[in-house]
Image (cartoon, coloured by chain):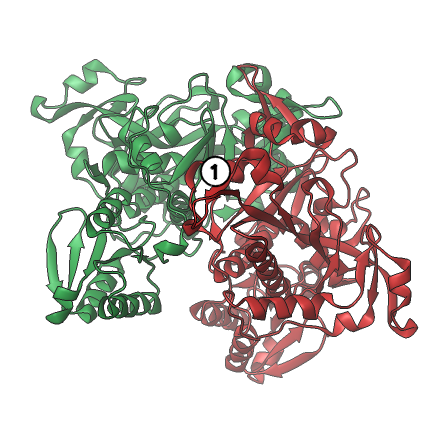
Chain colours: A green, B red
Amino acid sequence: MRLSRYFLPVLKETPSEAQVVSHRYMLRAGMIKQSAAGIYSWLPLGYRVLKKIEGIVHEEQMRAGHIPMLMPTIQSADLWRESGRYDAYGEEMLRIRDRHDRDMLFTPTAEELITDIFRANVSSYKDLPLTMYQIQWKFRDEIRPRFGVMRGREFYMKDGYNFDLTKEDALHAYNRHLVTYLRTYERMGLQAIPMRADGGPIGGDYTHEFLVLAETGESEVFYDSEITDLTFGAREIDYDNVEQCQAVLEEFTSRYARTDETHDEALFNAVPEERRRVARGIEVGQIFYFGTKYSEALGATVQTADGQSVPVHMGSHGIGVSRLLGAIIEASHDDKGIIWPEGVTPFHCGIVNLKQGDDEADAACEQLYAALTAIGLEPLYDDRKERAGGKFASMDLIGLPWRITVGPRGLKNGVVEVTSRRTGESEEMSPEDAVKKIAAIYANHPTPRGF
Amino acid sequence: MRLSRYFLPVLKETPSEAQVVSHRYMLRAGMIKQSAAGIYSWLPLGYRVLKKIEGIVHEEQMRAGHIPMLMPTIQSADLWRESGRYDAYGEEMLRIRDRHDRDMLFTPTAEELITDIFRANVSSYKDLPLTMYQIQWKFRDEIRPRFGVMRGREFYMKDGYNFDLTKEDALHAYNRHLVTYLRTYERMGLQAIPMRADGGPIGGDYTHEFLVLAETGESEVFYDSEITDLTFGAREIDYDNVEQCQAVLEEFTSRYARTDETHDEALFNAVPEERRRVARGIEVGQIFYFGTKYSEALGATVQTADGQSVPVHMGSHGIGVSRLLGAIIEASHDDKGIIWPEGVTPFHCGIVNLKQGDDEADAACEQLYAALTAIGLEPLYDDRKERAGGKFASMDLIGLPWRITVGPRGLKNGVVEVTSRRTGESEEMSPEDAVKKIAAIYANHPTPRGF
């Protein structure tokens, strides 16, 4: 993308309404614009990151055999009355009356609707196991929306639902989701720690939240420091293998890690003192097993092999897709701006032309642009007639992890400069080597197909 | 995808509520499920087609330099009061009151919000031209929703907006959009004819609707039969070239083609009688140039080169993404089911195993599946233990354009059967040749990246 043809309204001033760094930088970098309290437009740069995150979530869900579909944002209140949650949900549910005076609502979560789809179409144990998911806009009418997209009213969320014949099968689905979530967050350059959580309005005894450590997190968290040494990494996993998935769950949840909601002082004190940590965290996902809560309420049953009719065991599993942008920035920034992890960066690298209008510099930039594009990478080329300082400041603010700087002086020696946004370190090399270096960096960070 | 692991709830009976063939087949093929009047869940098969259509729309918009972004579904009423449309819009607008008693609405279109984003961030002619678009859920509270996704209440739509300094520039944007739309529909296997239209609530003198001819169309259309001979085809186009885009507009709009709203009997009678056609059509898109209507109402101005402040010239351009599924089926089906054009088919081909459980047949199917997957194609393998007749009926209903049939008898002679859904013709060949044939067919129908 050439910046002269893009829409990137970078702000010089820090907007006064933003209390946390991610909100400030998302506004300043021209990623979002508030349209009403807690409701945002996703400007082109923010949209690109949102779509990359969405793409990674899709790929990791599909890899585990989970099936994508989509439910509507507006639902009838009827199903929610059937489950008993219509009255229980309170004022955070956006209630709507249509022109025929029917009670509708903007979906905050979809256990009822997916269960309705299931009960209408599945009647035999032979069709199990089944896990379907969607990535769809949700609405929660927060009384005090704040922190930008981290606690907005309209938010983008992945919600998945498993249907299984037995508790054991459903717990395998639970473990499988835990594995997919570990992979998903790591691809985004995040460490998200599974912590024992509280069921809340979804319900359920088995539930873990995934938390990203950050000073601005809304939850207080207590954990054994050993847990931060764990990574899922590039290991192979067979999602059909019950023992393998169970082993990952045990590995990642056997150490103490809880939020304030479930914190147990006595258990925490059993952790060796030098490993006890109290910090703050941002919740970026949660998995639940809630048994037959919804299948019994809504009559979602299947016939077993011996002809019995039994309610299915279910769980639901969420990832806060739009919230993740905020969480990633909270975890990865400095005083100059955002530092995108390679997995989610909106563009793979920036190209800064130090002397726009200089024939040689322009030609070198065009060649770099063409070479990077030809191998499937997406550079952002700052081709504006601005002074170098302004170009660098914009690039630092929007946080592309790599920058190639091209100027007449370097070109005389046949070199351009490749700079890491994270370390600030620069290296001179030929334009060809610069392309090779960027290509090598992204070999391990494939652009998700769904992007 | 293996059918045994998929969720494809095919119905044997024809649902009584469906009046048109596309609605019937979408329900029977397990593509959608109604959750409330005019509101549908997109089951996995329907979701796949929706995403392919969305992907094609994205690719063709980005090819023209249009920039993707996203606006929220819920908006404040304030901007709509500023433009004067809040009261004008009538009961089709879903009006909502949030917990703080503020007037909100579910967006039916986004001229106001995009203009607000523009006026807050752009102040110089140097930042023009600019075209941004989104593909987002919309809501229109139809009094009588009908025809399934063709006239639903919650619908998925691409809406794009151009901002230009002069009328001439804005008309180039108009022409450019016309070209992108021609390409978009042709990639989906559709002929959509641009017809002179009426501005309606959007406003504007220059506007064309794109109509797909179909008996069940809601609009009566009048046209010169020569227009159906036109195709955009594989020709190259430079979207920056004003004359090239203008020439395409002239080529595709110089013959008589109008809907009942703009029909002019005298002009129509000037068409030679043997070329006059009266038919029905489904509207699948519309482009508008409406000048300074919204920029004046909302104060979206830029400074010109000589320091004057002028309102920008705008247009908006829509494609009915979810409606297109219905339109494509109306245009492409037979009495056995849907016939997907290659560009939008949910799976590239079906694999039918005539004798599931037979070692040789199973192995041959697995090899085909692996070979097709390895070259980036997505087959749907019917690996259920069902009789052949049922498998064929399901495949015909869901409409994959190509089917490979594998059975012990053919394998003895080293062959499988490749069948065209459209013609019903079958050809025997080796499994290797079958893979080559399917690959060759799809070489001209690349899967959109955004899928």
Q: Is residue B399 above or below residue A340?
A: below
x and y, in percent, of residue B411 in the image = 57, 79
x and y, in percent, of residue A421 in the image = 19, 48
Q: Is residue B190 above or below residue B437?
A: above
Residue lying at the far front in this picture: please name it.
Answer: B306
Q: Is residue B197 above or below residue A87?
A: below
Q: Could you classify mark 1 by the number of other residues whose Cα lies within 10 Å: few (under 14), some (14-19), or many (20 or more)?
A: some
x and y, in percent, of residue B366 in the image = 48, 68
B345 vs B275, nearest the viewer: B275
Q: Can residue B285 be seen by looking at this rendering?
A: yes
- Amino acid type of disc 1? Arg
Residue B108 is left or right of residue B334, and the answer is: left
Q: Could you say which quadrant of the image residue A266 lies in?
A: top left
Element assignment for label 1: helix
Q: Can residue A159 be seen by looking at this rendering?
A: no
Q: Residue at x 63, y 30 (%)?
A: A75
Residue lying at the far bottom in this picture: please name it.
Answer: B413
Q: Residue at x 46, y 24 (%)?
A: A37
Count of labels shown? 1
Protein chain holding label 1: B
Q: Residue at x 87, y 70 (%)?
A: B271
B152 vs B355, nearest the viewer: B152
- Indicate the quadrant containing the N terminus of chain A: top left, top right, bottom left or bottom right: bottom left
Which residue is disc 1 drawn over? B119
x and y, in percent, of residue B300 in the image = 51, 39
Q: Is residue A199 above or below residue B32?
A: above
B72 vs B403, nearest the viewer: B72
Residue B307 is left or right of residue B220, and the answer is: left
